[in-house]
Image: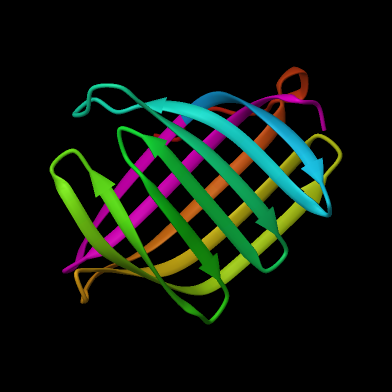
Amino acid sequence: MTRDVLIRISGQQAMDGDEHNVEVIITGDYFFKNGKHYVVYDEMMEELEGSVHNTVKITRDRMDIQKNGAIGAHMVFELDKKRQTRYATPLGDMVVDLTTTRIDLVEQEDNIKVSVEYSLGINYQHISDNSIIIDIWSRQKAQLKLRR
């Protein structure tokens, strides 16, 4: 895997019988250190001024997402564990509960793909069941298209 990567992040949220899908393709940096995959990228959010710097650390049984900037959080997805974090936004802080039910990691020479399923609670109340897929490709070998 090269340092210069393209990343497709796909998310699905199921809440009260409705499903919402989000997908984005962005550039980032990848590296492998101490048995862990790292991907670093910045995202702009339409409703917020400023960017959010993301560092994602991936192992076979855990994914950590550290957000800094316009939003601040350290989200930990660990199989069959409930993890709690403070999610800081310009509008105020929330207590976020993440209960991970599945993590799949596929590692190839020019591609790493992690899929996570989890339930989300905000301020101690269940909100939705979610999935996120982070698909990381060496930029020269990228096979990414937005799904419609």
Residue 140's image quarter? top right
Q: Is residue 116 above or below residue 3?
A: below
Residue 75 placed where, x, y %? Answer: 45, 58
Residue found at the very far bottom of the displayed protein: 80
**Which residue shows up at 73% across the image and 47% down it?**
37
Q: Is residue 16 above or below residue 65?
A: below
Q: Observer-nearest residue: 103 or 141?
A: 103
Residues shaded magenta? 1-24
Residue 17's image quarter? bottom left
Q: Is residue 90 above or below residue 51?
A: below
Quadrant location, the C terminus: top left
Q: Is residue 111 left or right of residue 145?
A: right
Residue found at the very far left of the displayed protein: 91
**Which residue shows up at 77% across the image and 23% down it?**
141
Residue 110 placed where, x, y %? Answer: 81, 34
Residue 64's image quarter? bottom right
Residue found at the very far top of the displayed protein: 140
6 is within the stretch colored magenta: yes
Q: Observer-nearest residue: 68 or 116?
A: 68
Most frequent secondary structure within the magenta stretch: strand
Q: Is residue 96 left or right of residue 5?
A: left
Quadrant location, the N terminus: top right
Residue 126 placed where, x, y %? Answer: 23, 75
Residue 108 placed where, x, y %? Answer: 83, 45
**Which residue shows up at 19% across the image and 69% down it?**
123
**Which residue shows up at 76% across the image and 36% down it?**
31
93 is within the stretch colored magenta: no
What is the tally of numbered marks visible in this picture?
0
